[in-house]
Amino acid sequence: MTEEEIRSIKKEISGCTRCVLSENRTNTVPGEGNSDAEIVIIGEAPGKNEDESGRPFVGKAGDVLTETLDKAGLKREDIFITNVVKCRPPENRDPRKKEVKKCRSYLERQLKEIDPSIIVPLGNSALKTVLDETKISEKRGEIFEKNGRKYMPTYHPAATIYNRKLRPQLVKDLEKIVEISEGGS
Ligand code: URA
């Protein structure tokens, strides 16, 4: 059932014209992975590679995500990976408030269907839009409860390309996320 609904949300997203981001996209990037996942990872927005392929996190940041997931004992197909907005903003600018607002129900519906044990916003932009919090460097690794859901933000993998010192911390956070998803706290 869930898989069917996830597919139907994906189909709806593919024809979406709710905001201006639909005007310049090559492909929508609805998200991918296990529709029964215990962990949902939320990035900010698709970039160039994602727009071209229709898949989330397939560029450089995606390579880091895959590598750090692997170090934490996770495969991409075990989890569900998506973004706050499902279309690439021009020149990779930050998604605007009204774009996030228009796109929000897709994310909400995905979360409702998948019903994961833990949701992981990556980086400041996802932290702000998903939890209305700022300062990822302070909030990473902290558990938030909101509307009956559990969240743990961590660094965006792209941040660990610019600052390599953050990478072991990203792995550590992902390890903790695995533990929580398996019923630990
Ligand atoms: N960065 C994101 O936040 N999301 C992607 O899908 C790719 C890069």
Image: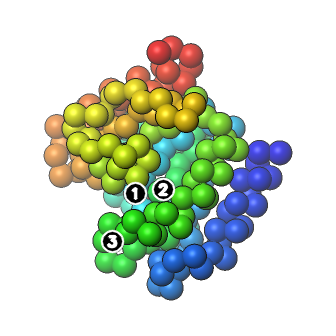
* Mark number displayed over residue 92: 3
Give whichever of 123, 143 is nearer the camera: 143
Q: Amino acid at mark 2?
A: Asn
Mark 1: secondary structure:
loop
- How much space separates mark 2 and mark 3, taking CA atoms? 13 Å
Residue 173, percent from left and from top: 35, 29
- Tell whether label 3 touches label 2 (CB within 8 Å): no
View extreme (top): residue = 184
- Tell whether label 2 touches label 1 (CB within 8 Å): yes
- Report the quarter where the N terminus lies: top right
Query: Where on the picture, by quarter, is residue 79?
Result: top right
| Up-down relation of residue 177 to residue 115 (above or below) | above
Q: Please give the count of numbered marks on the rendered protein.
A: 3
Q: Residue at 22%, 38% (x, y): give it.
A: 137
Horizontal placement of 160 versus 183: left or right? left
Q: Amino acid at mark 3?
A: Asn
Q: Residue at 46%, 63% (x, y): give it.
A: 100
Give whichever of 148, 151 is nearer the camera: 148
Mark 2: secondary structure:
strand
- How much space separates mark 1 and mark 2, taking CA atoms? 5 Å
Label located before the other in sequence (2 or 3):
2
* Mark number displayed over residue 174: none
Q: Residue at 80%, 52% (x, y): give it.
A: 4
**Residue, disc 1:** 44
**Mark 2: C-beta under 8 Å from nearest atom of ligand 1:** yes
**Residue, disc 2:** 83
- How much space separates mark 1 and mark 3, taking CA atoms? 10 Å
Give whichever of 133, 58 is nearer the camera: 133
**Mark 1: C-beta under 8 Å from nearest atom of ligand 1:** yes
Q: Residue at 70%, 68% (x, y): give it.
A: 12
Label located before the other in sequence (1 or 3):
1
In this view of the protein, can residue 157 be seen by the observer? no
